[in-house]
Image (tube, rainbow, N blue to C red):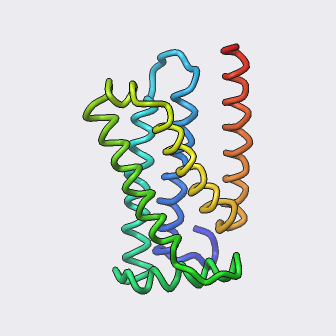
Amino acid sequence: MPRGVDGAEWAIRLTAFLAFAGYVLALASCRGRARRAGPSASGWWSLGLAAFLAHLVCAFHFEHGWSHAKALAATAAQTAEVTGIETGFGLYLNYAFALAWLADTAWWHLAKRSHENRPAWVDTALQCFMALMWFNATVVFGSPWGQAAGWAAVIGLGGWFALQRRRAL
């Protein structure tokens, strides 16, 4: 464990990292790959969601004492520190993020064919929202390690998707 990081902070950081890893591995697994052994995209997606929900539990338990008001105040203070605008709106975006990920995962597992045949704009809207949230969590508000991981994911996945698209043409 890094110096100056207690068990509670370690749990919050580790669950956030695992959620991000699940998200990135799901995206990398679902584009342009032949069927292979190992976790599927839906498996990574589900594991990422489970880690994100664990992250929310850890943050609310250890950091905010299960108080929405404390979480809102902390979000507003962190937003003001980074952007100069004191608003807790990001907390509500995090709630929406959790609900969107949960709904998509449930849809994927309960009605796989419907999920696979959904309109492209639904997937695009979800992925844009999630990518924006992850970019903010890692690059904008993250620690130096989080920023490095965020940029690596943006560059790596961007290159991967560009390569897949070029191969498809």
Q: Residue at x 70, y 76 (%)?
A: 83
> Residue 147: where, in percent of width, then height?
70, 59
> Residue 96: where, in percent of width, then height?
42, 60
Q: Is residue 83 above or below residue 77?
A: above
Relative placement, left or right, of 160 versus 39 is: right
> Residue 85: where, in percent of width, then height?
66, 81
Can residue 39 be seen? Answer: no
Residue situated in front as seen by the camera: 141 or 124: 124
Q: Residue at x 62, y 77 (%)?
A: 79
In the orientation shown, which residue stands out farthest toward the left? 110
Residue situated in front as seen by the camera: 32 or 17: 32
Can residue 47 be seen? Answer: yes
Q: Is residue 143 above or below residue 161?
A: below
In the picture, which quadrant includes the C terminus? top right
In the picture, which quadrant includes the N terminus? bottom right
Q: Residue at x 53, y 50 (%)?
A: 130
Q: Is residue 8 above or below residue 119?
A: below
Residue situated in front as seen by the camera: 72 or 125: 125
The image quarter containing residue 98 is bottom left
Relative placement, left or right, of 43 versus 80 is: left
Residue situated in front as seen by the camera: 12 or 27: 27
